[in-house]
Image: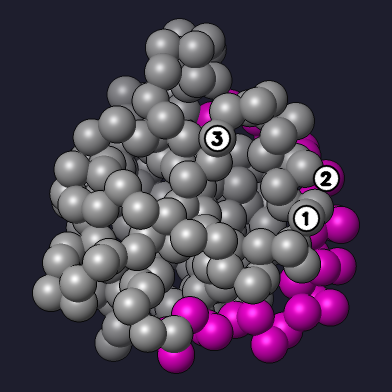
Amino acid sequence: MGKFIKVIKTGIDVSKVTKQLRKNPADWNHQKTEEGVRSLVDEHGFDDLPVSNLQLTIGAVQKKEDFVGDSELNVNTPAYKRHTEILKLIKEEFGDKEIYRCGFLALPVDEYVGAHIDEGTYYKTKDRYHLSIVGEYQYFTGCDTIIVKPGTLFWFDNKQPHGAVNIAEETRITFVFDVAHSSTNPQHEID
């Protein structure tokens, strides 16, 4: 494994998660219509990309001109209560650690998210993870790259340039989430 990406676990059964996603299709992109909140996608300036999002917990700002990357405020969306299976899976891996900003990101066939760095004071104390739900994609961080299959949980250094390319013949869905940085987080245990 590389320095900037570490696979924590593979073969996680995500079938109950996909069932809840199919049951609640109206939850996708709902946050773009809410006043005073920004999604993981908006926060990085991806409004013009074909990425869809379904946020469970989002960063919030008190004033519209404030940068969400510098805010520690997190708000659960209405979708949080409808997507319990993903939260159960994360709890199995992380125990009682608090999950901060989190949500699903969908990337259509043949699309990509270009290299970017998550900026702001919020990220200085958080570790970021993906749990792949649907589709296969290439993920890169710094000089590391991996091919990700459904059921793969990995950590990556989001303070380095990172991005994704959908290499499957279906829309890629991944769950992105943050946990407070700690030496007991899984990526440190596999060194």
Residue depicted at 68% across the width and 87% down the height = 26
In the picture shown, does residue 82 fall above or below 71?
below
Q: Position of residue 6 (x, y in %)?
A: 46, 28
Closer to the N terminus: mark 1 or mark 2?
2
First reached walking from the N terminus: tag 1 or tag 3: 1
Dot 1: element: helix
Image position of 123 (left or right of 104): left
* x and y, in percent, of residue 187 in the image: 48, 21
Q: Are marks 1 and 3 in contact (CB under 8 Å)?
A: no
Crowding at dot 2, Cα within 10 Å, few <14 / some 14-19 / many 20+, comes out as few
- Circle 1 residue: 84
Question: Label 2 belongs to which residue?
Answer: 13
Residue 89, percent from left and from top: 75, 41
Seen in the picture, residue 101 relative to 158 is either above or below; the reply is: below
Q: Amino acid at mark 2?
A: Asp
186 part of magenta stretch: no
Question: Marks 1 and 2: which is nearer the front?
Answer: 1
Disc 3/disc 2 C-alpha distance (Å): 22 Å
Residue 151 placement (x, y as % from top left): 71, 46
Residue at x 52%, y 83% (from the top left corner): 29
Q: 138 or 114: which is nearer to us?
A: 114
